[in-house]
């Protein structure tokens, strides 16, 4: 467990430094390779449960080439829950900062779990296939909404 | 047409805001979310609705617009990465279905809004755009040198020819398919611009391939049976050199694609495109 946490931390730090989006793919694929299935078992923190849910839903959506409103709503709900937790953590400790690697030998693990999980989720969303799927679905939703005169009110109450 | 965006669009905008802020979030743990989201929802969608509405009106027989871009749209697409990505995705979708009346104002906005840095991030978009334009051309739904075509080629694809090898190749395929319908002077200008813009990328690519090509024969070169633990057939000794040739060949592939232009189109003379011929003769 400590190893995967260290890997996750390394992914985040590398991505923050380089901006290479392949690291986002690596982050979520590493996680999904270790934890397959829709729910996360074992003694995991609630933050990890949220991240797992998002990574899993995005992965399934990319495989199917489709992200329906229910899945998207669940993703956004998880993001909001994490955001609330991160905001609460930020209130407790005035400066919540995900520390970057201090030296090549070791890492400082003074990350707030909620903030770290939020960064993980953002990276899972930034993963190129997931991002393109979301963009495609957004463009399609906009087209449905504006061009064909579909009733947006009906769409907003699924 | 100023409907409130649907719940789906709202949720998607939120998720996209996280995606675009991912690096920021990994870096500092803070995310300036609310501003980004509001731009997409409150400013961009109404503008997009106007674009669609105007395109519908134009289709009903009015003369087409003058190819200028909406200033507000340009400012929004320049300033916000989520808006930029959504508008490019929408543009691509319109081009894919052949709805050029809607695609054109968005193309104009993208042309004016994308800077060199942001263009460099949109390699996959550019490659897809070139592919879709070529598909439309193949179905005779879009004439080469028509205004949307010129807008995409001059305004986006030629500028982005150096972003990645993929964009470069897709652009060449697009030009090759359209070559017969283009004036030789314009074609020559396109090809030379593509060469000029992509010189750094081609050099980088060549160096990388060269390094790989040199590595392979060294590994396999000395009696391959020992290196591979006796697991090699006579054929595999040549595998390395075949790979190396492939590596060296990639540079040639590009050159041979360029050579196809001069072969296919005798109007393309050395006087018209001196740099193109210099490139071809250098190989």
Image (cartoon, helix red, strand yellow):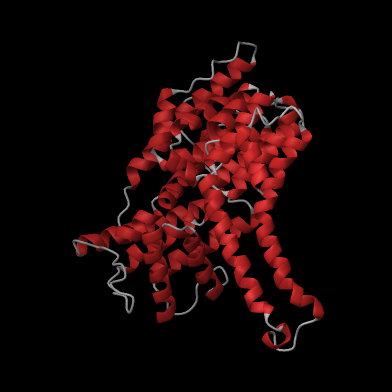
Q: Report the quarter where the N terminus of chain A lies.
A: bottom left
Residue plotted at (39% across, 39% down): B80
Vertical order, B175 against B68 (above or below): below
Please state, as top left, top right, bottom left or bottom right, where the C terminus of chain A lies in the image.
top right
> Which one is in front, A46 or B57?
B57
Q: Choose between A28 and A40: the one closer to the eye.
A: A28
Q: Position of residue B155 (x, y in %)?
A: 53, 30
From the viewer's perspective, is B73 left or right of B262? left
Q: Quadrant of residue A140?
A: top right
- The x and y percentages for residue A93 are 20, 65
Residue A141 placement, left or right of A19? right
Q: Residue at x 61, y 38 (%)?
A: B129
Front in this rendered view, residue B102 or A144: B102
Q: Is residue A13 above or below residue B270?
A: below
Does residue A102 appear in the picture of this structure? yes
Residue at the limit of the structure toward the left, as seen here: A94
Residue A6 sits in which quadrant?
bottom left
Instruction: State whether residue A137 appears in this view.
Output: no
For this view, does B257 lie left or right of residue A53? Answer: right
Q: Residue at x 44, y 28 (%)?
A: B73
**With B49 as the anchor, is B240 left or right in this view?**
right
**Mark count:** 0
Vertical order, B194 against B108 (above or below) = below
């Amino acid at each position: 467990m400590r190893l995967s946490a260290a890997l996750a931390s390394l992914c985040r730090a590398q991505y923050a430094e380089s901006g290479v989006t392949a690291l986002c793919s690596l982050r979520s694929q590493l996680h999904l390779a270790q934890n397959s299935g829709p729910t996360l078992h074992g003694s995991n923190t609630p933050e990890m449960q949220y991240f797992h849910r998002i990574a899993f839903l995005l992965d399934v959506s990319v495989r199917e080439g489709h992200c329906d409103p229910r899945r998207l709503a669940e993703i956004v709900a998880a993001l909001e829950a994490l955001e609330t937790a991160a905001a609460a953590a930020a209130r407790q400790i005035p400066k919540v900062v995900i520390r970057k690697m201090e030296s090549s030998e070791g890492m400082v693990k003074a990350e707030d779990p909620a903030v770290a999980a939020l960064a993980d989720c953002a990276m899972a969303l930034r993963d190129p296939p997931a991002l393109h799927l979301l963009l495609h679905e957004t463009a399609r939703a906009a087209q449905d909404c504006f061009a064909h005169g579909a009733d947006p009110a009906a769409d907003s109450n699924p | 047409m100023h409907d409130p965006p649907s719940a789906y669009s709202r949720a998607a905008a939120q998720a996209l805001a996280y995606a675009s802020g991912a690096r920021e979030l990994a870096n500092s743990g803070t995310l300036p979310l609310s501003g980004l989201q509001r731009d997409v929802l409150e400013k961009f969608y109404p503008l997009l609705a106007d674009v669609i509405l105007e395109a519908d009106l134009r289709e009903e027989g009015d003369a087409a617009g003058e190819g200028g871009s909406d200033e507000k749209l340009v400012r929004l697409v320049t300033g916000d990465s989520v808006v930029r990505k959504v508008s490019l995705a929408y543009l691509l979708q319109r081009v894919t279905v052949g709805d050029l009346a809607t695609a054109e104002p968005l193309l104009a906005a993208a042309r004016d809004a994308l800077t060199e840095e942001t263009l460099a991030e949109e390699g996959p978009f550019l490659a897809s755009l070139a592919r879709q334009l070529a598909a439309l051309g193949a179905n005779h739904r879009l004439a080469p040198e028509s205004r949307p075509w010129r807008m995409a080629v001059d305004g986006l694809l030629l500028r982005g020819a150096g972003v990645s090898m993929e964009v470069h190749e897709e652009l060449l395929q697009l030009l090759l398919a359209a070559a017969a319908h283009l004036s030789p002077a314009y074609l020559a200008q396109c090809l030379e611009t593509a060469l000029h813009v992509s010189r750094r990328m081609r050099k980088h690519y060549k160096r990388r391939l060269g390094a790989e090509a040199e590595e392979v024969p060294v590994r396999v070169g000395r009696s391959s049976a020992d290196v591979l633990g006796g697991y090699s057939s006579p054929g595999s000794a040549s595998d390395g050199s075949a790979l190396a040739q492939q590596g060296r060949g990639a540079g040639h592939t590009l050159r041979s694609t360029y050579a196809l232009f001069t072969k296919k189109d005798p109007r393309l003379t050395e006087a018209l495109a001196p740099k193109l011929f210099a490139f071809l003769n250098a190989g």
